[in-house]
Image (spheres, coloured by chain):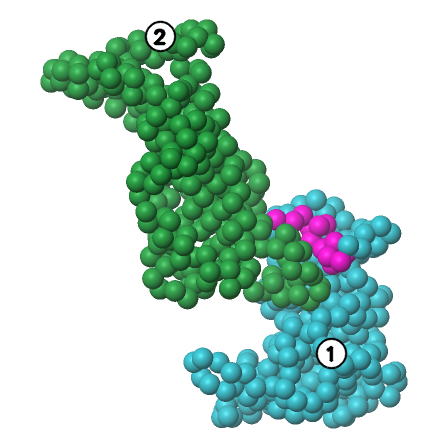
Amino acid sequence: MATPQVSRDGGAQRARPLIDIQNVSKTYVTASSGNVHALNKVDLTIAEGEFVCVVGPSGCGKSTLLRMLAGLDTYDAGKLSLDDQAVTGPSGKVGVVFQAANLLPWLSVRENVRLPLRVGGRHDAADQRIDGLLEMTGLGEFGARYPYELSGGMQQRAGICRALARDPQILLMDEPFGALDALTRERMNIELQRIWQTHRKTIMLITHSISEAIFLGDRVVVMSARPGRILADLHVPIPRPRSFDTIVSHPSYAKLASEIRGLLNAQEGAPND
Amino acid sequence: MTSTTIRSAVSPVEVIERTDLNPDAAMQSAVEDAAPPPPQGKRQAVNGSIIAGMGLVALIALWIFAVRVLRVPPYILPAPEAVLNALWSGLAVNPASPKGFYLPLWSTLSNAAMGFAIGTGLGLVLGSLMAESRTVEKLLMPYAFALQSLPKVAIAPLVVIWFGFGDGSKVAIAALLAFFPVLINSFTGLRSTEPERLDLMRSLSATRFETYRIVKLPNAAPFIFAGLDMAVVYALLGAIVAEFLGAQQGMGVVITQAQAVSDVAGVFAALVILGVLGIALHSSVRRLEHRVVHWAHRGKR
């Protein structure tokens, strides 16, 4: 267990695959630079209950991959399925956590978190979920406040609550803590780990931070520069619950970190073709 | 009044930035008319009433100076006390008296209010349809701008022919003037919605109307209020212009009648009332905006 292993299947043997990406490619057409080959034959399977972090250089298509899973973007080739159903558009199985929270400033915190229930006209008993979610993330007293009255960390907590409002199986998180300062970010990582352990969602999280990826992930998937491919799929053999104090002293932490850093650094000089 | 000047000084730059979604360059210059949400300067708000008060005192001092020292004749510029007198004789009467300002004021205001409601309502509905559909935009935008570039005073006689000398023509011209600022501002505001917010609604499988109602309309609210702010004054203007062409009652009639007997002080008194009314209407729209669009004022630094 001390050596990080490169495995294609990761934890997929433990449970059924919930997210299945096979051979997916994507080419954008832009006005300024013509055809942009964003993703190239990406294969990735994520099992039910698994926490997978995706790291890669800027513009490698990792956000595109997440948007495709959320049904917000189309793909040209390959197969993309959630819970054995091909992705054709947004689905109730998925909750999305956006960069920088993306709360609506004209709604109170509670109304923001309730938004997924309001859309589609679901209210009633589900409303109690909202209070539970706010309590769980320490926002219980802030429900009536407006987003601008909250710190960045609290805003993103509300963003996570909103993604959980419909009780989705899958949580897709697109660099959710990128805008936060380092300390707040660590605190949010610890909190997210706790949320994941209590709710057992399947999470795919995109990040730039190697330490965040290792801290949170059961697996860390490293992507190449554009067109994005999967370079490595690394299992993180560090027991949970993890803490930032103990994780750095774990023998596999340094090895994983340097391996990921090596893979990413090798991409810096790679041509973007 | 200070805030109005600040806004018009800032608006063109901001609106050009916001209209980059609009592909037609020819229309962009006209879109500059659309005022963006006014910037909120805290300092102006604190000193605003003091500055306005000092300005008023200076204006009256200048007026007295012109009348007493420069001896400007009263048929050009009546003395302040003569205007005050005319104001008093129009205001200190039974509200039902035909000699007072109340009946004509009520008549003008109610026509302006009706025109405002129709014009801004139509502007919001058509602006929304244009923002939602490229087809409707391509279909209506040229006519909207054609209509706006016609001088309203020139259309007014036509409107009188259609709607007669009664309230109908006053309401119609007030509506015509109130329509355009709300049309353009709601269109611009609705189109300026951040793509991330639209993604959020899409990820929730929201219907088009839910997206409009929950995201686009609140997003456009500061723009729409800036449009309403202009529209409320334009509606008043429209009603009075229509009254000049012929009416039984209204502040426009008061002015033309005073003019007919060379009662310059009477004309001034009516103008003072209309000016005060304009400021009152403008500030009540602003107060409403602060209530409704509270997040835009307290949130931004």
Residue at horizontal 80 percent and vertical 80 percent from the top: A85
Residue at screen point 25% across, 19% down:
B259
Q: Quadrant of residue A190?
A: bottom right
Judging by the rendered image, the residue that carries numbered circle 1 is A87
On the image, the x and y values in percent for residue A81 come to: 76, 82
A116 within the magenta span: yes
Q: Amino acid at mark 2?
A: Ser
Which quarter of the figure is the N terminus of chain B placed in? top left
Stretch in magenta: A106-120
As helix, strand or loop, the secondary structure at mark 1 comes to loop
Tell me what hue chain A is rendered in: cyan
Question: Which residue does the image show at 63% across and 86% down from the upper left?
Answer: A76
Q: Position of residue B68 (x, y in %)?
A: 15, 13
Residue identifier under label 2: B89
Q: Are marks 2 and 1 on the same chain?
A: no
Q: Is residue B79 visible?
A: yes
| Chain bearing mark 2 | B
Q: Furthest residue to the left?
A: B70
| Callout 1 amino acid | Val
Q: x%, y% of residue A6?
A: 74, 93
Q: What is the drawing colour of chain B?
A: green
Left of A273 or right of it: where is A52?
right
